[in-house]
Amino acid sequence: MASAAEIDAMRRALLLARRGPRGLNPQVGAVILSPAGDVLAEGFHRGAGTPHAEVDALSKLAPGEARGTTAVVTLEPCNHTGRTGPCAVALIEAGVARVVYALDDPTDAAAGGAERLRAAGVDVEAGLAASEAAALVHDWAALQRTGRPHVTVKWAQSLDGRAAADDGTSQWITGPAARRDVHARRAEADAIIAGTGTVRSDDPALTARAADGSLLEAQPVPVVIGESDTAPDAAVRRHPREPLFYATHDLHAVLTDLAARGLQRVFVEGGPTLASAFLREGLADELLVYVAPVLLGGSRLALGDIGVASIADARRLTVASIQQLGDDTLFVARPAAAPGAPTPRVADPGEPTPRAAAPGAPTPRAAARPAAQPAATEPAATEPATAEPAFTAPAPASDNRGDA
Amino acid sequence: MASAAEIDAMRRALLLARRGPRGLNPQVGAVILSPAGDVLAEGFHRGAGTPHAEVDALSKLAPGEARGTTAVVTLEPCNHTGRTGPCAVALIEAGVARVVYALDDPTDAAAGGAERLRAAGVDVEAGLAASEAAALVHDWAALQRTGRPHVTVKWAQSLDGRAAADDGTSQWITGPAARRDVHARRAEADAIIAGTGTVRSDDPALTARAADGSLLEAQPVPVVIGESDTAPDAAVRRHPREPLFYATHDLHAVLTDLAARGLQRVFVEGGPTLASAFLREGLADELLVYVAPVLLGGSRLALGDIGVASIADARRLTVASIQQLGDDTLFVARPAAAPGAPTPRVADPGEPTPRAAAPGAPTPRAAARPAAQPAATEPAATEPATAEPAFTAPAPASDNRGDA
C-alpha cells in the first residue's frame, strides 16, 4: 500500500506532468522520495527528444543518492529504447528500491517496465491515482490506438438543420452562451480545422476567444483543408499559431500528418462540406451540434451528403448530453457503432514509426509561403507546444513511447 | 363569496359541460340550487341549435320552481339572441335570485349577461373556478378571436433536419415513445391534416392509435389538402371519421371552413410541403418537432421553403419545452412574435356569422364521391361530435355565441 508521503508525491507528480507539452509523447511527472519519505528530486517530460520524467528526476541526484529511494511516477516506466534508454533500466541501475506508478503504459512497445523492475528485485506498486493519470494522457493514448487525433465535428444550425439563410447570411444563429461554449472548447483542442470554402466566405479567425473578444491563453493550431487558395490577407494568417494548409481532400492523410505533429485533439469547425466529409469518412469521434430555436428553410444545409442512401444506413448517434446554452440547445453525441461503418483507424498501433507522416500524406504549406509555391517534400514534425512551430525545420527525432 | 354548496355545484357543472360536444359553441354546464343549497336541476349544452346549459337546467323545473334559486354556470349567461333568447333574460324571467358563474363570456356579441342580470336585481358572483372553465373553452375562445382553428404543425426529423433518407425511406426515424406521444396528441385534436403528396406516397391512416395499433376512443377528422387525387383504396378513406378533401392550396380558406365546422384544433402531420406552407403563411400556432438522434444528410428535408430569404427574416421560436421520449427529443415551440410576420387572423372577431364558410372558401368533397366529381357549392357546416358527419346535409343553423 502506498504511504501518505507517496500519495502526496503522486499528487505532485501529476502537477509536474502538466508542465510538459501535449504532443508526440505523453505528459509524465516523477518524484524521488528518500526512504524516510522526503522529496529528493522532481522531474517531468518536456517532449519528444528530451529525457523521460524518471530520468529527469534522477539526473538531479548526486551519484549514488538514488540508492534505496522510491520513485513515484504517473506512468509505468517504459521498457523500450528510443532516443533514451528504457527508464526501467535507468531506475534499476540507479538502485531505486521501490516504484509507485499510476497508469500502466497503454502502448505495446513501451509496456513491460513493471515486469522488468520486479524481475530486478524492485518493489513495484501500480494503480495509485490511475484515473487522474489516465485522464491526463487520454488523448495521447487514444492517438496511439487509432493512429490519428481525436476528432470533434462542430456545427451550429437552425432547428431545421440549416447553417444559414438562403442568401448566405448566418451571423448569430446561435446566442452568446453557445458561442462562449464553442470558444472554451476550441481552447481545449490542439488544432482547429476549416475548409477553404469557409475560410474564403466567412474569413474566420479560428482563434479561441473570451467573451470580450480577447484571445484565450491556449490557442489551437489553425488548419485549412481544401484546394482553393486562401487570400494573403485572410484573418487566419494573423492567428497566433502558424496555420497549416493542406491542399487535398484526403482527410485520412491530413489526420495522419496532424498525428505525426503531436496534435492529439482536433476541432472541425466548418463549413458544411468539410463536416459532411468527416462524417462520410467515419472520422468523427464526437459531434457538437448547437441548435438555435429558429427555422430557416431553404438550401443552406448544415450537412450535405454524408453517404446515407437509405434509412438502413442512417448514422445513428449516441447522445451523451443535451444541454441548454441560453436559448440554444447543445447536443453532444458520438456516432453509434454500426456494422459496415468505415473504421476510424488510419494507422496500425503496432506500426513502429507513427511520428512521421505516412507515405502519400499531404505536406502542408507553411503560411508564410505564397499559396501557389510547392511545399517542402519532407514531412516536418514539430512540437506544437512551442509558440512558433518551425515548419521548415528538419524533423526532430521522437522517442515516442510507441516507437519500437 | 360562494358557499360550499355553490363550490360543489360548480365542480359538478364543469363535469356536465364536458358531456357536450366540442364544436361551434362552447361546452357549458349549469346546476340550479335551492335556497338551502340542494341540487334542483342540472343542464349542459349539447351543441349548436340546442338550448344553452342554463335553459336546459331550468327546463327541468316545474313552473315557478326556479323562483329564489341560485344558478351555478361555467360561463357567463349570454346576452344575445340567436336560435334561443338571451340566457340572462331566461334566468330573470324564471325568478332566479343569484347567479354564480366561472368565466366572463369572451365574445363581444354575447357578453353583457352579468350586467343585465345585475340590472334586474339578480345577485351575481363571477370568477369561481374561472381557470378550469377557461381551460375547458380555451380552443373555442381562441377560435372566436382568430376566426380559425388552433394549428399544431408536427414533424419528425433527423438531427440534421431530414424527414427521410435520399431514397425516400423514412420508416421509424423516431422511436416508439415518440410515436406514442404523437398518437396521444392526435387524439386531442379535432382534425388531422395531410397533403395529397403524403397521402399518395405514405398512405397514412391518419388515425389516433394505441401502442397495440388499436384505435383510441377520440379520433380527429382526417383532412386532405392538395390538388392531386387520392386513390379510391387509400387508407384515409377507411378512417372512422369521414375525410374532408380540399382541392386547393389556399390554407386560410381551408382553416376558415374547418372553423365553420366547429373544428377548433387541428394537427398538421405532413409532409414537408404542407408543413412549410403553414409556416410560410404564418398559420402555425404550435410546433412539435420530434428529433431523432440520427444523421441522414441528403435531399429529403423536413422543411423546404418557409419564406425566409435572409437571416433577419429567420423564424424565431419560443421553446416551451424540450423533453426526451426514449432516444428522441421533442421540441414544443411556438413562433415568437416578429414584426412583419403574417397575421394569423383570417376572420374578424366582430364578424356576425363565423359559422358559415367565408365567401370564396373551398368546399370539401365528401369522401364517398368520385374524386373528380364537382363538390356541392353550398358550404356545409356540421357538428364534428356526431360519429358520421353528414356532409351533404343542409347547413344546420347555429346559435354560436358570436352571432350578432
Image (cartoon, coloured by chain):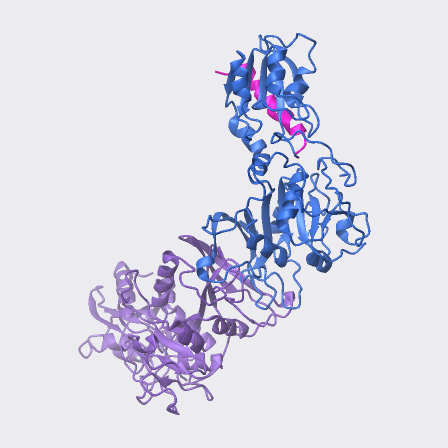
Chain colours: A blue, B purple
Q: Tell me which residue sits at (62%, 31%) in the image.
A: A403
Question: Vertically, is B227 above or below B180?
Answer: below
Q: Which of A220 and A213 is in front in this view?
A: A220
Could you tell me if residue A341 is visible in this image? Answer: yes
**Left-right relation of B72 to B295:** left
Q: Which of B205 and B141 is in front in this view?
A: B205
Residue B3 higher or lower than A96, as above or below? below
The outermost residue toward the left is B62
Membership of A17 in magenta stretch: yes
Q: Quadrant of residue A188?
A: top right
> Which residues make up the magenta segment?
A1-23
Q: How many marks?
A: 0
Residue B188 appears in view? no
**In the image, residue A104 lies in the stretch drawn in magenta:** no
Q: Is residue A394 left or right of residue B196?
A: right
Residue drawn at 34 percent across, 77 percent down:
B234
Q: Quadrant of the C terminus of chain A?
A: top right
Give the main secondary structure, helix, strand or loop, of the magenta stretch. Answer: helix
Residue B206, placed above or below residue A328: below
Toward which corner of the image does residue A95 lie, by quadrant? top right
> Which residue reaches farthest front?
A359
